[in-house]
Structure formats: C-alpha cells, structure tokens
Image (tube, helix red, strand yellow):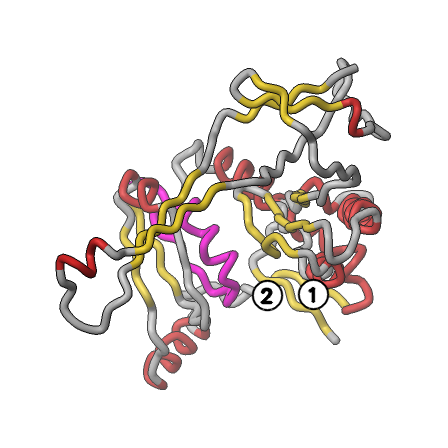
C-alpha cells in the first residue's frame, strides 16, 4: 500500500534591507544587499485509516510517497507515533440525572475517560448542559485540574422538568410578574424564561456576578426588568404588619427537613405537586 501526499504550495521570502543611519543616496541604493530565502524542508502530518475508519498503525517510510507538482520528492525524515488528543466532555445536569444516581455514574464515566489521556500532551475541556451549554473549564493539558473541575459541576436542578411543568400549568403563557430572591446567578438567569409576554422580572437578589440573558428573546417578549434595592426599616414594619393582619400569606416556609435527609428527600422538592414555596434545611 502506498500513501500519496501532494504538496502544491511553494514558499519563497525575499528580504531587502538597506543599512544606513542617514539619507540614502542613489549609490547607496544600488549597493543594497538582497537576501533570498526558501523552504528546504516541509512538514506533512498525516493519519491513515482503513475503510471502516480505523487508524492504521505501524506504517513505514516506504509506505508513503510525496508528490509535489507531479514530481516525486525524497522523504528526508520519517517519524510515526500517537498524535495529541483534544477531548470535549459534556455532562448532562438536567432533572433526569437526579434519579437513580445517574449524575454519579456520569462523573465516574468522565473520570475513566480522563484517566486514558496523557497528562501534558492531550487536552480536554469540560461543559455542562441542561437547557443551555455552560463551559466549566476551557481546553487544558493540565488533566489534574479537570478532575477538580468535575467536582464543581452543579447537581441537577431539574430545569427542563421545571420549565415544562410551568409551561403546562400556565397554558404556555407563563407569569406576568416573576420575583427572584434566590441569590444564585444561574437561577437568576433562568428566571427570564418564566416571564410572560410584556411581563416584568424583578430581581431582589444582589450578587457579585454578571447576569446575562438572551437579548432577542428579551425583546421578543417585551420584558420589563426591575431591580429591587434594600428595603428600609419602615418597609419591613409595613410587611410584618400586613402578615399579622392576614393580608400577606405567612406560611411561606412550606417544607422542612434535617440535613441528613437531604440526599433522599431533595428530589421531592422538585415535584410541582408538592407545593413547595420555601424549604428549610435544619442543621
């Protein structure tokens, strides 16, 4: 078997340099030195696969032939080996991953794939996705840092299931006014999706982070965005008085659980039928 590689591009560089500290005369111009350079060695990197797409290994120099503009060229040096690998890993953090230990198995599978890479040579990047793609770590050859980044992948929030449930509950219309008081940048960004056409999104949370949203979708819905600043003492007194008089629901803390029960019971909080408004974890 012969593998042909055709080179059709020749490179030539001409450098003209005039060495002078002062004005250049006609004689000096005629005495300019012209340097001409060319490419004597061209590197060609190739990989060979069979009809089924499998890489063919153990090829020798005699298995290759270089043809440049119809002429066969001599192969000066020949090296074969493994090329560096660039691996992009996408971890699903949608609601379905919270069932039956799926997220744990996914993390284990990623760890196995990372273990097969060569540190300092191969590179990898880590992404997570639910309703959108988020980059956890950019491409890096420091594979140890990827193991640490894998621990930072957020646990499934069930955003896809939550969105579908709200869409069904509101007949695809969503809510005229949405308040966010989570203090979580990711949750604050997701809140835009629950605002109805011409609705209002009120951000009560204050976080030291950038909050982004899809601008075409924001304009399409004609959304109004409001920021609610810290309230005064009088505001708190007014709210407390209204709660005591029964004008504002006081039972906002609808669920409680012990810290040790969180792994088992947390998924039940994602069920819309549970009627969760605010859940408190008691430590």
Residue at image position (30%, 61%) is 226
Q: Is residue 29 above or below residue 38?
A: below
Residue 14 position within the rendered picture, expressed as x and y whole percent measured from the top left: 36, 46
Q: Quadrant of the C terminus?
A: bottom right
Q: Do residues under tags 2 and 1 come within 8 Å of each other at their CB atoms?
A: yes
In terms of image quadrants, where is residue 179?
A: bottom left
Q: Dot 1, how many residues are within 10 Å of its Cα: few (below 14), some (14-19), or many (20+)?
A: few
Categorize mark 2 by other alpha carbons within 10 Å: few (<14), some (14-19), many (20+).
Answer: few
Residue 36, position as x, y percentages in the image? 40, 46
Q: Residue under label 1, please give it.
A: 256
Name the residue nearer the viewer: 13 or 274: 13
The reply, left or right, for residue 98 in relation to residue 210 is right
Q: Which mark is residue 253?
A: 2
Where residue 243 sits, quadrant-wise, is bottom left
Stretch in magenta: 176-197
Q: In this orientation, which residue lies closer to the viewer: 210 or 49?
A: 49
- Rendering coords of residue 28 (x, y %): 20, 61
Mark 2 lies on a secondary structure that is: strand
In this picture, is 259 found above or below 165? below
- Residue closer to the observer: 42 or 170: 42
């Amino acid at each position: 078997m012969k593998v042909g590689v055709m080179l059709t591009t020749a490179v030539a560089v001409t450098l003209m340099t005039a060495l002078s500290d002062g004005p250049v005369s006609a004689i000096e111009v005629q005495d300019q030195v012209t340097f001409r350079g060319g490419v004597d060695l061209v590197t060609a990197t190739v990989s060979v696969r069979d009809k089924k797409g499998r890489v063919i290994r153990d090829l020798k120099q005699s298995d290759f032939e270089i043809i440049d503009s119809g002429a066969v060229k001599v192969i000066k040096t020949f090296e074969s080996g493994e090329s560096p690998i660039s691996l992009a890993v996408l971890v699903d953090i949608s609601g379905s991953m919270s069932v039956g230990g799926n997220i744990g198995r996914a993390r284990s599978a990623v760890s196995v794939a990372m273990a097969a890479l060569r540190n300092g040579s191969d590179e990898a990047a880590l992404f997570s996705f639910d309703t959108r793609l988020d980059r956890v770590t950019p491409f890096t050859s420091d594979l140890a840092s990827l193991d640490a980044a894998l621990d930072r992948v957020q646990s499934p929030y069930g955003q896809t299931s939550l969105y579908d449930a709200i869409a069904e509950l509101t007949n695809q219309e969503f809510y005229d006014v949405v308040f966010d008081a989570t203090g979580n940048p990711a949750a604050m960004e997701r809140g835009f999706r629950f605002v109805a056409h011409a609705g209002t999104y009120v951000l009560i949370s204050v976080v030291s982070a950038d909050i982004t949203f899809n601008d075409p979708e924001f304009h399409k819905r004609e959304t109004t965005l409001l920021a609610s600043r810290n309230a005064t003492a009088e505001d708190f007194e007014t709210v407390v008085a209204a709660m005591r008089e029964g004008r504002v629901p006081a039972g906002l803390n609808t669920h409680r659980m012990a810290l040790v029960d969180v792994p088992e019971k947390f998924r039940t909080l994602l069920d819309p039928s549970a009627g969760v408004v605010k859940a408190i974890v008691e430590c």
